[in-house]
Amino acid sequence: MVSCKLVSNLKPLQLKAITNNINGASFSIAFSDTYLHQLTDNQADLAISPAQDLPYPLHSDFEVIALYHDFENIFQPSETNPLQGFWAVVVKRNREDLKQLFAGDNNILTKSGRVDLVGFGPGDPELLTIKAERLIKNADIIFYDDLTNKEYLETIETEKVYVGKRSGKHSFEQQAINYMLLKSAREGKNVVRLKGGDPMLFAHAGEEIEYLQRCFINVGVTPGISAAFAAAAALRIPLTQRKISSSVAFINGHSKKIEMPNASTLVYYMASSNLNEIRNVLINKGLATDTPVMLVENVSKPTEKQYITTLNNLSQNYQTPLIVIVGEVGRR
């Protein structure tokens, strides 16, 4: 029998509902709102708290080893409050003995799956990494974006959910997507969130990672080839080159305020509707009007088209998805 000192801000009956289901342990219980401080000072072995009350990020000295739903089912989780109605068991890290105690079926974390954010790359499935393809083929459910290859996905025999976003056209808002990822993981599924290009560049990876980690879901990230690198490869024009360009900047091309970072090569993503503004901003900030501009539509796809012009002649006559590369690396 393991003897544990437990501190909590729950009601006695709520604690009893949890501790009665833990075999092989006896608990001495103290009630306090400063439960994490008592863990820090070794006055307690574990703390139990409403999950939504825990600070985020949780201090690196601590970890959540169990998550239980409110046994009275009074409070239900929702998109806006996914931790509502859950109680979390917090311990100091590396307490394997306590992890074993709380490893039962009632522990939601024991049954939860994981979410992998996977970069599909620019569109050509042959540019997938080996790891990305393995995760896709082993997934129980895939949530995919616009710029992933539909023909390739048709060869994958698993559940697939389209959650793409194009300018002015969202199949789901981001909060709804976050909750769908969480709900699938809580159902014990291995979830793949498949994103065009690289998940960590001009995507919503940061929001999704924070949301899922805040809900104690294990999250992995697998990089993909970003469209800028695919465009440079297609054009056979490097983004950096000795004596010409020693720096490169990636810029959001559909932002309301176009930026011109201090870099030798500028790469604008999602820029098809903002080309006139990009031209005007760069010229007004001193970039030469004859600076080369390289544009690639549908990079790496059978419908790919390439164009080379100058900054002064840059116009609005290109299709989305579009990558725009500006810099002396394109001068030939």
Image: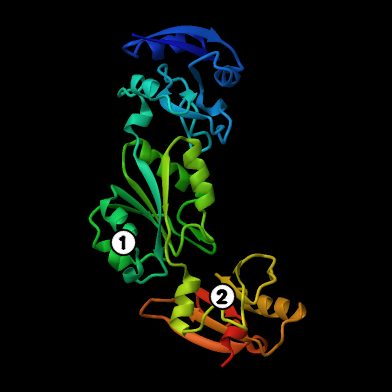
Mark closer to the chain start, 1 or 2: 1
What residue does disc 1 label? 130
Name the amino acid, label 1: Ile
Residue 81 against residue 318 in the figure, above or below:
above
What residue does disc 2 label? 272
Residue 75 place in picture, x, y as percent: 48, 23
| Left or right placement of residue 285 versus residue 63 in this view | right
* CA neighbours of label 1 inside 10 A, class few (<14), some (14 to 19), many (20+): few
Residue 66 place in picture, x, y as percent: 41, 25
Residue 313 against residue 91 in the figure, above or below:
below
Task: Look at the image and tell me in which quarter the N terminus lies.
Answer: top left
Residue 25 place in picture, x, y as percent: 36, 10
Residue 238 against residue 39 in the figure, above or below:
below
| Left or right placement of residue 86 versus residue 289 in this view | left
Whether residue 195 is visible here, answered yes or no, is yes
Question: Which residue is at the front of the view, 84 or 19?
Answer: 19
The reply to whether discs 1 and 2 touch (Cβ–Cβ < 8 Å) is no
Task: Look at the image and tell me in which quarter the C terminus lies.
Answer: bottom right
Question: Which residue is at the front of the view, 109 or 42?
Answer: 42
Residue drawn at x 37%, y 31% is 109
- SS category of the residue bearing label 2: loop
Residue drawn at x 38%, y 76% is 301
Question: Which residue is at the front of the view, 181 or 92?
Answer: 92
Tell me the distance, in whole angstroms, between the alpha carbons under discs 1 and 2: 32 Å
Residue drawn at x 48%, y 73% is 229
Name the amino acid, label 2: Ser
